[in-house]
Image (cartoon, helix red, strand yellow):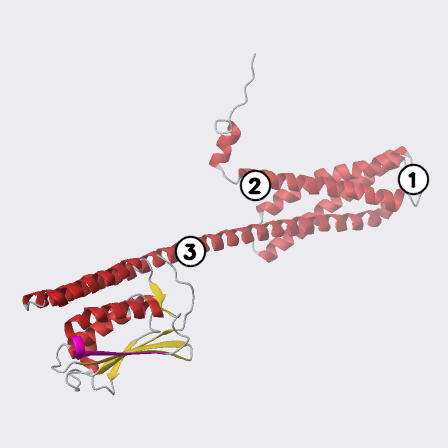
Amino acid sequence: MTIQAMPIETSAIGQQYRRNPRWHQISESDALFWAVHCGGWLGISLLTYVSLSLPYDQFEVPYLAHNLLQSVLGIFISLPMRYVYRHIWSVPIWPRICVIVAVALGLSVVWAVLRLLLFMALTDERGLWDEFGGWIFPSIFVFLTWAALYHGIKYYRLFQEEQQIILEIEARQRNEALMLAKARAALRESELKLLRYQLNPHFLFNTLNSIGALIAASENNKANDMLLQLSAFLRFSLDSGRRLEVQLEEELAAVKRYLNIEQVRFADRLQTEVRVEPGVQDCLVPSLLIQPLVENSVKYAIGRSEEGGVIRISAFAEASRLVLSVEDSGVDGVCGSTPEKLFQQPGVGIQNIMERLQTIYGDESPVQAGFSPLGGLKITIRLPLNRGRVENV
């Protein structure tokens, strides 16, 4: 006959484990109890041997047998304490203490009586009842110690279980927080990329309109130059499209490409000034942040002015902030709008910038507008002074 091992999934043990996942923990608890319970009582035999048998030279078999058998009696007599204490575990503390002490005292008296009777039966010594006090007090100490150890180990194990539960809850919360942070980061990147890509169609629409106007005016050479500049700008835009932030010098290079496009259309009517403080060229800024501001000035200041005008771009460090500003000379030296109107009905470019800055920095980098000494509007943005590494998305 061949005997095959039953898989744990189909065995009685496996079925019991599935019904009660804590079954194996209960078994471990029982094993720990019996190890401490029996080990403690055998330790009492060893202690009695060292403290009584050795000093009084009681090496006869009856004395040694009594020493061992009293521990065996203690193993069985103290066993009910475990079940009583488990049964009253949920009882309020003071009534429970009274029961704990009463049970320990009662069983200690039983153990003292039985081991005294056993001693007289094995050694034939008589008249020892007058010395019962010397038997009962050590018994009380042993049983109270048993009760204290039982509750100490029980509370320690409960404390360990609570700590494990707390650690598991904290780990689960950390995982959930990490997943939530990743989800928010992914959503933030998606929103930023969507806003970032929104600029290209807007810019392309305006530029193609300008090219169409040049062609209609039979200025084919200017239209061709503008197409070449547009191609270079779009190529740069695609190359930087995977980065939410770029270094300031790269952003200014993109602005220069845009201005080259507009220079074809406006020629000498468009004058530009770029003032960049040394040491801030490597600071990080959101990609295509300045270009929409410059485009706004071209459209509402330079494009409406018969004599053209000036656009000034500035960048400098102020404390822990990078200050960027774009200002223009207005329409023929006069501001054609007010800062309030700029935010009441913002164009696509300004609205895009405000949404991107809000998404990236929250309320730390507001867009501010005021009047420029050049005669038009001045738009200022303050960013965190960050010289970190550029990351692709």
Under mark 3, the amino acid is Leu
Residue closest to the eye, 281 or 393: 281
Query: What number is the disc on residue 178?
Result: 3
Q: Compare marks 2 and 1 and give the one earlier in the sequence.
A: 2
- Membership of 271 in magenta stretch: yes
Residue lying at 54% horizontally and 22% vertically, measured from the top left: 5
Which contiguous range is marked in magenta?
267-276
Local SS, label 3: helix
Secondary-structure class at tag 2: helix
Q: Which residue is identified by label 1?
A: 58
Hey, what amino acid is under mark 1? Gln
Q: Is residue 251 visible?
A: yes
Residue ID at (35%, 58%): 184
Query: What's the mark number on residue 186?
Result: none
Is residue 22 rendered to the left or right of residue 188?
A: right
Q: Residue 237: x and y, percent?
A: 27, 61
Query: Does residue 249 show up magenta in the picture?
Result: no
Give the residue displayed 24% in from the left and 63% down from the top: 233
* Label 2–label 1 contact, CB within 8 A: no
- Residue located farthest toward the top when viewing the structure as drawn: 1
* Residue 209 location (% of width, % of height): 11, 66
Q: Is residue 211 left or right of residue 171?
A: left
Q: Is residue 351 visible?
A: no
